[in-house]
Amino acid sequence: MLADFIHNFQANLFKPLILFFLLGFGIPLLKVPYQFPDALYKALTTYLLLAIGWHGGIELAQLRSSELLNAVGYITLGVLTNGLIGILAYGFLKKWACLRKIDCAAIAGYYGSVSAGTFVTAVGMLNSSGIAYNSYMPVMLAAMEIPGCFVALFLVSRLRNQKMDTLGNVPGEKGYRDDLVETKHTEHILSKKVLLEILLNPGLYLLFGGILIGIVAGMQGSNPEKGDYLLFVKLFQPLLSLFLLSVGMMASQHLKDLKNVGSCFYVFGLLGPNVFALIGVIMTFFYMRVTGHQVEQGSIVLFAVLCASASYIALPAIQQLAFPKASPTLPLATSLGLTFTYNVTIGIPVYQQMAQMICG
């Protein structure tokens, strides 16, 4: 088992994808005078979401009805699992991290959601290693983005019922002021504005749009000589490399936001993903035992990656709308600076080993 892990770790760590990430990570640390163009980062994010969705749609178009039913079951499991992970994250942070409860709720929401960047990195590694995964996994990515939004909204709603003030403090926390207690909620958890922000955020819209276009293209027949195939398949790896260069820079820049947090915060950001991934693998194991549906090894890896990852794209928009008094830096610092960095360098080989144990 140890030999297999070392082999997977070495094989993944020295892949060009990870080396590009490490290259970007070193730019702020070494104070290299370079700034990744913001417009290019947005263009790469758009492309990757569309490409993942398109490829998933192509494969979904070929599923039989029985396979589609299995896909719905596994995706439902993913949604429930990520909701559970968000609640567990809040319980740990509230007990052990010296943070305000509203900040704990915000971070829990980030971890109850997923990182599309981590997912596409794992997909790139699986493709280069020739490891198969089920075609519906891009739909899983989109579905598992949603639970964290509702977890954060639910937790913040409970805090407001505990007489949280307009600064985001609850009774017993430093700086709490009775005269500033909120008299009404800024946005209800099921308000039209919040629901539209969740379901129509740009990331989900592009991902689902790519899936639908891929389904249509799959029904028409996929041809390796067609332009869309060349665009979304042949260019995927090189453009993913540029994306990881930019995210490496972002992760390194956010590390400075962790200067004044306790050690429990670092433990959560670096070791928490392993616990969440293990929960995902165990849930998959029982799902396969109960339903008899055999999940591809690559899908187990991707499911573990999704459980272990944390959002840094969708949740900031929800936070700004529904609970703006939570810290804008701490959630991004832990999800991007700690968890994303850990997942793409060390975590994915660990989760791959977990999946091999289950498949065995």
Image (cartoon, rainbow, N blue to C red):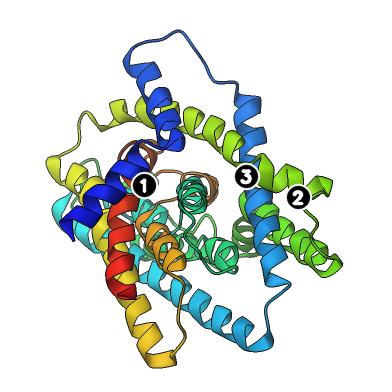
- For the residues labelled 3 and 1, say whether their Cβ atoms are less than 8 Å apart: no
Q: Residue at x 40, y 69 (%)?
A: 83
What count of labels does the image hold? Answer: 3
Q: Residue at x 39, y 53 (%)?
A: 309
The residue beneath circle 2 is 229
Callout 1 environment at 10 Å: few (<14), some (14 to 19), or many (20+)?
Answer: some
Q: Position of residue 76 (x, y in %)?
A: 50, 78
From the image, state whether disc 3 or disc 1 is nearer to you: 3
From the image, state whether disc 3 or disc 2 is nearer to you: 2
Please say if 17 is above or below 308.
above
From the image, state whether disc 1 or disc 2 is nearer to you: 2
The residue beneath circle 3 is 48
**Which corner quadrant of the image does residue 183 belong to?**
bottom left
Q: Reading the chain from its start, which is encountered first: label 3 or label 1?
A: 3
Q: In the rendered image, which quarter contains the N terminus? A: bottom left
Q: Amino acid at mark 1?
A: Leu
Q: Amino acid at mark 2?
A: Tyr
